[in-house]
Image (cartoon, helix red, strand yellow):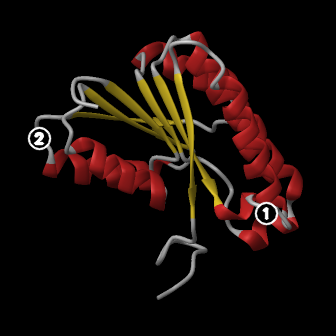
Amino acid sequence: LGGKCVLITGGGGTIGSEIARQVALCKPSRLVCLGRRAEPLLSIQDELRRQNADVEVSTEVCDVRERNRLAAAFAYHHPNIIFHTAARKDIVPTESDPAETVLVNIKGTINVVELTVANNADMLLFTSSIKAFRPACVMGVTKRIGELIISDAAQSPGKIFCTLRLNNVLESSGGVQS
């Protein structure tokens, strides 16, 4: 990660912001937090700049469903490594609006994967969920499809595409509370 440009989708969320904190410690050349809500992005940007003055931190307000805006962010920043954490993960909202969940979790993942390839990035890590194992809900099904998209992309020679399944995130918005 050191000396590389790292882009994190969902960079203002619970998972994305924690990944950003950890990546910043590795001294990337640039750390880009991308998400659809400005307030949490600016909050993590301020925190990262205070704690890592020697790391260039940028934000991009962009929804992964919006391919043209996402493509512009990739073209501007030229990321080497992408952590794709943007997703609809909370069970109640995903079940009540499955079409939105499909757009974000599947179409968004396709967009990120295609732009990773088109921009010749070295690596993409996709955060999935244990709910993708024998999925019984919309979120689980869409995350499983995301895993299959990543698995297909992993056939690209010289590139690293991998998936990390996460359990419930304690104290996250919509997560299990301790």
Estimate how packed mark 1 is, as few (under 14), some (14 to 19) or many (20 or more) residues with alpha carbons within 10 Å.
Answer: some
Disc 1: which residue: 94
- Above or below, comparing residue 173 to residue 64 in the picture: below
> What type is the residue that disc 1 sits on?
Thr
Q: Residue at x 56, y 37 (%)?
A: 162
Quadrant in which residue 111 is drawn: top right
Residue situated in front as seen by the camera: 42 or 164: 164
Residue 22 visible, this orientation:
yes
Q: Position of residue 30 (x, y in %)?
A: 28, 28
Which residue lies most toward the bottom here?
178
Q: Position of residue 61 (x, y in %)?
A: 51, 38
Disc 2: which residue: 53
Marks 1/2: CA distance?
Answer: 38 Å
Apparent side of residue 151 relative to residue 23 in the rendered image (left or right): right
Quadrant in which residue 135 is drawn: bottom right
Which residue lies most toward the left here?
54
Residue 65 visible, this orientation:
no
- Above or below, comparing residue 44 to residue 63 in the picture: below
> What type is the residue that disc 2 sits on?
Ala
Is disc 2 placed on a helix, strand or loop?
Answer: loop
N-terminal of the two: label 1 or label 2?
A: 2
Apparent side of residue 134 relative to residue 127 in the rendered image (left or right): right
